[in-house]
Amino acid sequence: MDEENLKTIVKYKAKGNKNFKNYDAIVTEAVKGKYITVEMDMVGYIVLLWDSFMFVSDIFGNTITCDYKVTRDFTAKKVTTGGKSSLVVKRKQSGKLKIL
């Protein structure tokens, strides 16, 4: 799985506002039909739950949504070696994690 497949756009709407703002994010964990965990710059990790057609979260009245297609359950982790960062993706198969 390429890093390009892990990139997504998260829409954020502050409480009381009518407009959404778009932010770039990287999906670090996904379970089809249940939840995804995204990492956003300057914010950290956010868990978004599946709501029949997209992933959503409500934090202190602020709405966060993401339209991401999960094809397989996976977990991604950033690894830094020699000053270069890369992503290691593992997918779940038969209850075990396998490195892709």
Image (cartoon, rainbow, N blue to C red):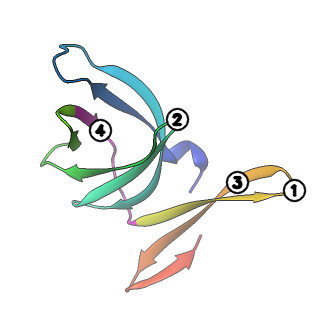
Mark in front: 2 vs 3: 2
Q: Earlier in the sequence, mark 2 or mark 3?
A: 2
Secondary structure under tag 4 reads loop
Whether 16 is drawn above or below 59: the answer is above
Mark in front: 1 vs 3: 1
Distance from the alpha carbon under mark 4 to that under mark 2? 21 Å
The percent position of residue 55, horizontal first and vertical second, equals: 24, 45
Amino acid on which the number 3 mark rests in the picture: Ser
Pointer 2 residue: 42
Amino acid on which the number 2 mark rests in the picture: Met
Residue that extends furthest to the front in the rendered view of this protein: 60
Residue 59: say if magenta: no
Distance from the alpha carbon under mark 3 to that under mark 4? 24 Å
45 to the left or right of 79 = left
- Residue at 80% in and 50% down: 84
Whether 72 is drawn above or below 16: the answer is below
The percent position of residue 2, horizontal first and vertical second, equals: 59, 51
- Residue at 18% in and 13% down: 18
Pointer 3 residue: 86
Part of the protein shown in magenta: 63-73
Distance from the alpha carbon under mark 2 to that under mark 3? 19 Å
Residue 71: say if magenta: yes
Mark 3 surroundings: few (<14), some (14-19) or many (≥20) residues within 10 A: few
Mark 2 surroundings: few (<14), some (14-19) or many (≥20) residues within 10 A: few
From the viewer's side, name the closer residue of 48 and 51. Answer: 48
Pointer 4 residue: 67
Tag 2 near tag 3, CB within 8 Å: no
Pointer 1 residue: 82
